[in-house]
Image (cartoon, rainbow, N blue to C red):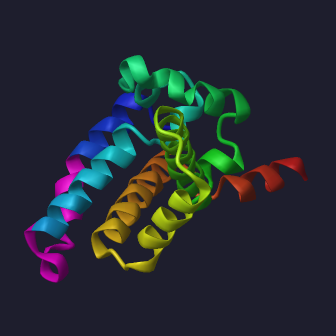
Amino acid sequence: MASGQQHDRATCWLALPYGLLWWPWLGPIGALVSTLAFLMGGLWLSPDLDTNSRPYQRWGPLRWLWWPYRKALRHRSVLSHAPVLGTLVRVGYLIGIALLLTGLAHPPSSTDLLSWMQQQWSRPERLLLVALIGIEASAWLHLIQDGDPMPIRSRRQKRR
């Protein structure tokens, strides 16, 4: 299992080469978005947000947002460290918190919220997809460095 410093170093070293992979299809904007998403995924949205880790500490005064997440999930649980699912849980959690805080600041009517959600889901956004793939790619880097990109399988094998 890699240390937090090793995870950070690998993320920083591989972010630009990863982003440049997207250049032929999406140009400089796509490369920039994918690079930044890879960095964001590795440095701020890491699978290790379920512990008092470097990514958790990086949130600074906003790290309290992740306290319920940390308390609800066991370290290396399926919901935090499984490929795809872990990223979906972290991104979904962050979106949920943002919607909750936005709703507290300016409560929308139910029709406003439904209208907004339809607008977001009805138009395809390649850059949003590239950003999500970048966050997931950095999670895979993290899991590979930890030595087991499939934590579910290893737990089943240990129980036997």
Q: Is residue 20 magenta?
A: yes
Image coordinates of residue 149 in percent, x first then y, are 56, 57
Left or right, 39 with respect to 69, comes to left
Q: Residue furthest left?
A: 28
Is residue 97 visible from the viewing direction of this image? yes
Question: How many labels were placed on the picture?
Answer: 0
Query: 159 above or below 68?
Result: below
Image coordinates of residue 96 in percent, x first then y, are 56, 46
> Which of 12 and 90 lies nearest the eye of the viewer?
90
Q: Residue furthest bottom?
A: 25
* Residue at the spot 72% in from the left edge and 33% down from the top edge: 72
Is residue 20 visible from the viewing direction of this image? no
Q: Is residue 125 magenta?
A: no
Query: 2 above or below 123?
Result: above
* Residue at the spot 52% in from the left edge and 48% down from the top edge: 108
* Residue at the spot 65% in from the left edge and 28% down from the top edge: 68
Magenta stretch: dominant SS? helix
Q: Which of the 4 quarters of the picture holds residue 7?
A: top left
Left or right, 124 with respect to 106, comes to left
Q: Residue furthest top?
A: 61
Query: 118 above or below 57?
Result: below
Q: Which residues are magenta?
A: 13-28
* Residue at the spot 16% in from the left edge and 59% down from the top edge: 32
> Which of 69 and 107 lies nearest the eye of the viewer?
107
Image coordinates of residue 18 in percent, x first then y, are 24, 62
Image coordinates of residue 19 in percent, x first then y, are 20, 63
